[in-house]
Image: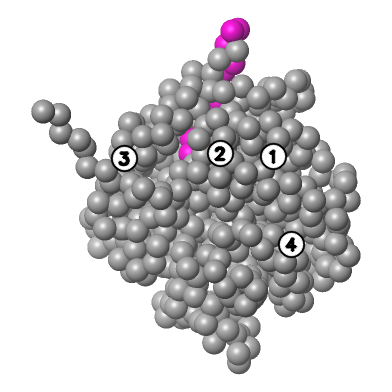
Amino acid sequence: MSVQAPHLFPSDFLWGAATAAYQIEGAHLKHGKTLSVVEKNMNKNYADPSIASGHYQYWEKDIALMRELGLKAYRFSISWPRILPDGRGKINQEGVDFYRKLINKLKEYEIEPIVTIYHFDLPQCLQEEYGGWSSRKVIDDFEAYCQVLFTYFDDVNYWLTINEQSNMFQLPYLMEFNPDIPLEKQKYEMNHIMTLAHAKAIHLCRTLLPNAKIGPALGIIPNYPASPKPEDILAARYADEMRTYLFMDLYMKGEYRPFVWNYLVENGIEPTVEPEDMARIQSAKPDFIGINYYQSRVVKYIPEDTDKKELKLNYDGKDDDTQYDNIPGLFEGMTNPFTPKTKWDWEIDPIGFRYILNELYDRYQIPLMITENGLGTLDELTADKQIHDQERIDFLRDHIRQLQLAIKDGVEVWGYMPWSFIDLLSTSSGFRKRYGFVYIDRDDKDIKTLERIKKDSFFWYQKVIASNGCQL
Ligand code: BGP
């Protein structure tokens, strides 16, 4: 008698895949769209966003591939400057029509759209007009943008407010800062303003789309202590406080964590908090939290008189080319001798995935959705036009296994959106670093044919979805 393995993924589990507008669409200054901050700051040695993956042109082909893959959901972002070229006011009907067609087609194929409202693409004109996220003026503009989305796309059931508020602190190309104001001070001011904008989006969604589900998508990196030394144990805790729980507590409890707040005050970098702010944030509880998980990190204690270091990513895929960041007196990142790494030095740690999902669910008791997870690597197109990306299959399989175990541990997870559906423009590393299930025939220098070619991982994931995660 054959015994069936326990069916651990719920029958309505959202097997999906993810992308973001500026990384796939192209047509970045066409059809009424204007420039965004992240597009402006893209490294000039990479493919520029004028074509990206050509999705604006080939969206129908792409959705047909999603259908063939068997996706139950698709996470994508709407480009703010495509909808509102001036940041506010006049609506670009062509932009609205583009996303309307996309959503209609997804619905026709019974693929649930999961829409990110903000994925790093602030209209450049708002940056120039009032300094973007450094001014409270952006809150009203963001709310007005949300109002347009909730009105035109009122059949979308899942919304993500802001992508990776936590990473916008660390990756310089995602934000623009005023050189005349101390950098750390600005970051925490911007973070506060962004949290208020996120709260406004949730409030508005409750009014206009009371049946929709809404939450943020946070980039999460669990921090492990470098050794059992008590100083290192504390360092890992502090790193989690500053890099994860600061954001989670703001979203979930509407509070600054006392440790973080005291640190900010001691260093004179606390944000300006107006009387109604915290109540407004507190009353905007999300329905779920989106988790972008790629890696874990090791941290060690470093004394206060150490020099400050900013994170410098490995941009070229050369081994050991990352400069880990620190906060003197609290912690400094370092490499983990126990985990393998991607070519870009990202620690491959599926068990860390299970660990952090348990940790977040225990603390906050809120459903989670995996909004990104994937392997960025070089993919080789063979002469007979195939891509044997076994490394990616192994990465995803190991992570899905741990996800399954996390669900068994009791964590409520709504869906899994690996990054990415098709190859796209990596913000940090251009087109060399690929993530997709579908290969796009182009590189940084040459647009080539933009042909869509299914990788081995495409056929593998197709079976995973069809078996609801039983066939890994
Ligand atoms: C996340 C972003 C994505 C994507 C991904 C991979 O931080 O939300 O937009 O870029 O990371 O990162 P990268 O392209 O730098 O490898």
Kindly state the secondary structure of the residue where label 1 is placed. Answer: helix
- The residue that appears at 50% across and 43% down in the rendered structure is 72
Q: Which residues are magenta?
A: 372-384
Give whichever of discs 4 and 3 has the lower sequence position: 4
**In the drawing, does residue 85 fall left or right of residue 48?**
right
Observer-nearest of 291 and 156: 156
**In the drawing, does residue 408 fall left or right of residue 298?**
left
Q: Label 3: few (<14), some or many (≥20) within 10 Å?
A: some
What residue is pinned by disc 1?
Answer: 24
Kindly state the secondary structure of the residue where label 2 is placed. Answer: loop
Asked if ligand 1 lies within 8 A of label 1, the reply is no
- The residue that appears at 68% across and 31% down in the rendered structure is 61
Is residue 182 in the magenta section? no
Q: Label 4: few (<14), some or many (≥20) within 10 Å?
A: some
Please tell me whether mark 4 or mark 3 is closer to you in this view.
4
CA–CA distance in space, label 1 to label 4: 22 Å
Q: Amino acid at mark 4?
A: Tyr
What residue is pinned by disc 3?
Answer: 401
Please tell me whether mark 1 or mark 4 is closer to you in this view.
4
What residue is pinned by disc 2?
Answer: 420
In the rendered image, the vertical position of residue 69 relative to residue 40, given as above or below:
above
